[in-house]
Amino acid sequence: MIDIAKEHIDSFKFSIAKNSKEKSRFIGEVARTIKSINTNNLVNSFKLEETTISLASTIDCAWKANSK
């Protein structure tokens, strides 16, 4: 049997308004990042995971910078 500890985790909902400057900036940042990915470097699973983590981090930062 595995004991599960009770824990309180605060969560927040953020969004970006439709047709806003923030939406345009967010999409632009993500598009530039995707466009800049060098797929020639994806020669093994380590490089793929490294690139995926970097992309996720960039999307997360862009979301935090542009959402309310």
Image (tube, grey):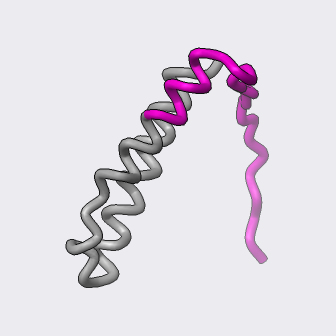
Q: Is residue 11 magenta?
A: yes
Tell me if 26 is positioned left or right of 40 in this view.
Answer: right
**Where does residue 23 sit, x and y in percent of width and height?**
61, 25
Q: Quadrant of the N terminus?
A: bottom right
| Secondary structure mostly taken by the magenta-highlighted segment of the chain | loop
- What residue range appears in magenta? 1-28
- Quadrant assignment, res 49: bottom left
Q: Is residue 63 above or below residue 50?
A: above
User: Is 68 drawn above or below residue 15 in the view shown?
Assistant: above
Residue drawn at point x = 28 percent, y = 76 percent:
42
Q: Is 54 in front, or is 27?
A: 27
Who is closer to the viewer here, 13 or 58?
58
- Horizontally, residue 55 falls left or right of residue 17, namely left
Tell me the residue at 40%/52% (across/down).
34
Q: Nearer the viewer, residue 52 or 25?
A: 25
Figure label count: 0
Image x and y of residue 61, in percent: 45, 33
Instruction: Please state the horizontal and vertical placement of residue 68, each as a whole percent of the image.
Output: 66, 16
Q: Please, which residue is most extreme toward the bottom here? A: 44
